[in-house]
Amino acid sequence: MEKIIEIKNLNVKAGKKEILKDVKLNIYRNKINTIVGPSGGGKSTLLRCLNRLTELEPNFEIRGEILFNGKELREYSDIEVRRQIGMVFQRPNPFPMSIYDNVAFGVRLQGNVKKEKLDEMVRTSLEEAGLWDEVKDDLKRSAFTLSGGQQQRLCIARALVLRPEILMMDEPTSSLDPAAKAKVEDLMLDLKEKYTVVLVTHDIIQARKVSDYTAMIFNGKIVATGEGRDLLEESSSDSVKSFLGSVMA
Amino acid sequence: MKVISNDERASVTWKNIKTRRGKDGAARALGYLALLVMFGILASIFGYIMRGGATHITIQMLTTVGNGSTGGLLNAIVGTWLLVGVGLVFSLPPGILGALYFVQRKSMTRMASIMRMFTDVLTSVPSIVIGLFGYLVLVIRFNMGFSLTAGGMALGVMMLPYILRVSELSMKDVSKEQVANAYALGADDIQVATRIYIPQAIAGVLSGILLAISIAAGETAQLLYTASWNNSFTSGFLHSRVAYLTYVVWYGIDQPGQSAHNLAFVAALILILTVTALIVISKYVNYKRR
Amino acid sequence: MAIVPAFVLLSIVGFVFYYSIPAIKFMGINFFTTFLWNPGIQSKPPEVVNGVLAPFGASFGILLFLLGTVVTSLLALLIAFPLSFLLALTIELYTPLRLKRGLISLVELFAGIPSVVYGLWGIVVLEPVLLNSVEPWMSANLSFIPGFSGEVYTGAGIIASGIILSIMIAPIITSVMVNSFDTAPEGIKRGIISLGATKWELGKYLITNYSRSSTYGGTLLGLGRALGETMAVLMVSGGLVNVYPGSIYSAINTMAAHIASYLDSAFFDSTGMNVAALAYLGLVLMGISLVVNIIGRKIAGRGVLRGYESD
């Protein structure tokens, strides 16, 4: 069990409002690390601290330590952090361009890559995201012609093309229909072979299905952590039960 | 699936982060420079006009009439407001009623979208062309002569599309449900307009009118050959020529002699203070709405 | 009542056209291909040319004014476009949210300053600077560029007009760009940043892709304003007539400014041909302005993203 990220005493304030309080959490390599909790509990903020997207918020005050591969996150360049920690958002956000250009975007932005190499990288990423067979004949098509589930997998491919170490997913299935959702869940299980996955969700059933390690967050505090599925069983401790009650309600 | 090795990660040549950061920093620096240049110019305009105006403004200037290069500005100050007033008389009714028409049920028809396009296009007719039209049609053909009416109408042509579109925008924010409810209760178009659209959109409409006034007060080209100029007050009121502040700025600075220049500066000072005040009030009114 | 603007617009077009008919008959296409503007001699009896009565020896060509309008407007765009892009980028990306509103209001204030005030500033501040420092330096150091060599005159002219116009249209272009950056979906902006883009790279993407059409549209709207601007140019252009500008330091004249400066002399022509020629000039100016503005509006208003719900 190798730790890839260690979060120690992370506190985040937005103005006077405390969003995260004394968060301690480890993220393990090549596992699905799940953060569950009700909406507004600070899950997304925690995720955004990890790729420093919080820096876009002018009034956020962030204290504490986040170690990425043993080195303080702030000592990396934000460009490097975002290259090594990819992110997929709640709502699919394809760019207004072709499928190919969407996937190639990150590499064109960050790298100097020849056409053949780029083709290969786009193909690999689309394969990893389980989308290649559906789109291979029509890569020039606008990304908006894809279904919601396909769009979300396209966004996954777009993040994977940078060959990140970690893939963060912020409630990636909440806007998808059940079939598309199941596909993305299966995909996560495949992806952990190559990547570390950090999943944020309020969906306990999803967490039970895929999670290796689970942290529960409530009102900005981590209330329980543990080996994924066990923690989420009904037989757990009272505090967890009452928490589950509040989440499921 | 095979695990991505560090070798594979390294096989892409990434662009130099320092170079990219450098470009970002350069863009930021240039951006701040652009802000500095722009607001430096704004400060320079306000500064010069404040200084040139404030050091020469006298009570006498504000209380006597003049001819644009000597005397006072009273006729020009009064004339500016008279022209704006007449402009409002001609632009306000069609502006507000037109906005109501667009925003009520007919707004989706093809006819309405064509009318809306015409309204937008009217804003892009150069002001000197409106002035020329005013001269040819109002002054000559309709025998108005150089007059307050002709000048005011020429200003109205410019204010109308502005008032109409801004009013329409603020009426669009009115809750559709309320409107539907009112119709369901048997209200007719006029009742919906007077009881729902106008009261709820009044702040937005008002701020649009104030902006239109601020633009009209600063216009010149429409007025040169419609209102012409008057060395005194308008004697025949609607039928006689009328003075206005922008004329003094243009004419005064072109005349030899310090006193004419002083007059131009004072006129410019009054103009920018008026315009700024109108813009600020309009923003405030619009802000209160939210 | 909604029909009033359309009625007014059509009357303007119709009447200006109607009054320019004698000049159209008189000059025909030569109006566009000659550059001499000769009011004719009133003391001699008028003559009939092409079936219309015109003052003796009169001839009207607008080539100089067309050239002046195009040159000053393009110069204005050349300055205003990069300036506006930098302003919009800075306001949108490099400014804390709290300052942003204030900056946008200041930009709007710019757009509200009357054109005679810009003209006044041009005369008392800009012209002396151009005359004493900028233009002599350009003449001495940039004379290898065609049109940049030659004598410096008064400071009024092409450069002064271009700069004043650029200051007047930059707020228009800037606010269209800011608006378009603002309405770009959060998802796109966040997505690009989370792929490791710098703010500059995000701005570059927005302007070349997402906001491309608003950028073109806004620029055209600015151009439309520059083409039709009268008073500020009238005050700082130097009012050149019947002579080609020898260099970039020369005085100049534009279509709009010429109408404003010449109409009172045109009254004295008993045949009415001088007024008709100005109406013809006004018709041409209006035609160009309307075309530029309509295209600008069409492009600026075109939805870039179909099927993209905003957050």
Image (cartoon, rainbow, N blue to C red):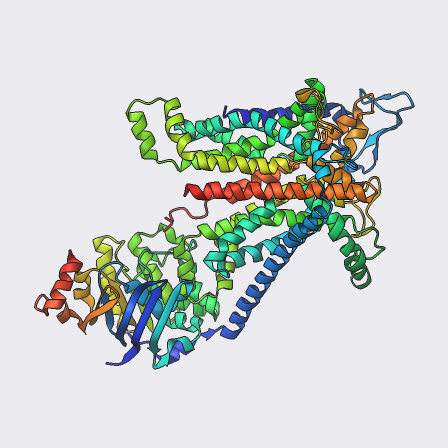
Answer with left or right where residue B270 lies relative to residue A130: right
- Of A15 and C275, which appears nearest the observer? A15
* The quadrant where residue B232 appears: top right
Give the quarter of the image for residue B238.
Answer: top right
Q: Where in the figure is residue A47, as x and y percent of width and height?
A: 31, 67
**Can residue C172 be seen by looking at this rendering?**
no
**Residue at image coords 70%, 29%:** B132
Q: Does residue C258 appear left or right of residue A44 in this picture?
A: right
Q: How many marks?
A: 0
In the image: residue C72, left or right of residue C154: left
Q: Residue at x 57, y 67 (%)?
A: B26
Q: Image height check: is A15 above or below C217?
A: below
Is the N terminus of chain A in the top left, top right, bottom left or bottom right quadrant? bottom left
Is any atom of residue A11 visible in this view?
yes
Q: Residue, x 63% and y 42% (percent of image)?
A: C225
Q: Quadrant of residue C37?
A: top right
Q: Position of residue A60 (x, y in %)?
A: 38, 65
**The furthest residue to the left:** A235
Quadrant location, the C terminus of chain A: bottom left
In the depicted structure, whether residue A59 falls above or below residue A146? below
Which is more toward the observer, B148 or B60?
A: B60
Q: Residue B125: x and y, percent?
A: 62, 34
Q: In the rendering, at what x and y percent does residue B8 appear? A: 38, 77
